[in-house]
Amino acid sequence: MMDVEYDIRLITIEDYDAIYTLWNAAEQSRRALNPVDDSREGIDRYLKRNPNTCFAAVLEGRILGVILTGHDGRRAIVHHLCVHPDFRRMGIAEKLVSTAEKALKEEGIQKIFGLVFKDNDPANSFWESQGYTLRTNLNYRNKSLNDEIPAGE
């Protein structure tokens, strides 16, 4: 693991272009995007609702990684965690997760969940290493209220 000096800070909408570029640099993150929720307007709406729980890892002005987490007052969800492929395995994802968890706990949230593609073995292994267990007793169901957002598989 290489030592990289980076800062963790809150995300603002001014970071959108850099974050969108980062998401598109990673195949699994690109796969999870949708044209409405991950648009500038969608992320702006998300950040206004969750101003204290979304973070970026930044090195010399460059965003190396991001985590978007939010909550409904009861449970939190990790919507996006992404580290640029050139900066993986340096502890950035772990630091982003622990920072987001601390912020959520400060807001009174006691439980977090996240969604990971079943075939994304590296991400599933990462989340397991962070103490996130696999729930096998639930079915995840969704319904798109917008024709621009695919329902998924």
Image: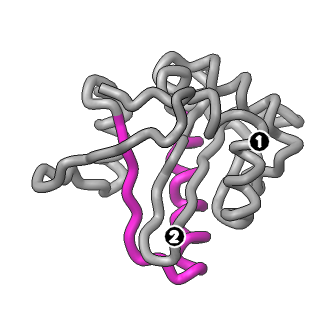
Q: Say whether residue 88 is visible.
A: no
Q: Give the labeled residue for mark 2.
A: 72
Residue in view at x 77 percent, y 42 percent: 41
Of the pair 77 and 62, the residue shown nearer to us: 77
Residue in view at x 61 percent, y 70 percent: 103
The picture places residue 54, in percent across and down from the top left corner, at: 66, 55
Of the pair 74 and 98, the residue shown nearer to us: 74
Q: Can you say whether 86 is above or below 52 in the image?
A: above
Amino acid at dot 1: Glu
Q: Give the mark, 1 or 2, whose residue is nearer the N terminus.
A: 1
**In-image side of 112 versus 67 (left or right):** left
Amino acid at dot 2: Asp
Q: Residue furthest left?
A: 137
Magenta span includes 150: no
Distance from the alpha carbon under mark 1 to that under mark 2: 20 Å
**In-image side of 15 versus 71 (left or right):** right
User: What residue range appears in magenta?
Assistant: 90-116
Residue in view at x 44 percent, y 39 percent: 144
The picture quadrant where one finds residue 81 is top right
The picture places residue 34, in percent across and down from the top left corner, at: 56, 29
Q: Which secondary structure, mark 1?
A: helix
The picture quadrant where one finds residue 85 is top right
Magenta span includes 97: yes
Give the crowd class for mark 2: few <14, some 14-19, many >=20 residues within 10 Å. Answer: few
Q: Can you say whether 141 is above or below 18 in the image?
A: below
The picture places residue 14, in percent across and down from the top left corner, at: 88, 43
Q: Give the labeled residue for mark 1.
A: 41
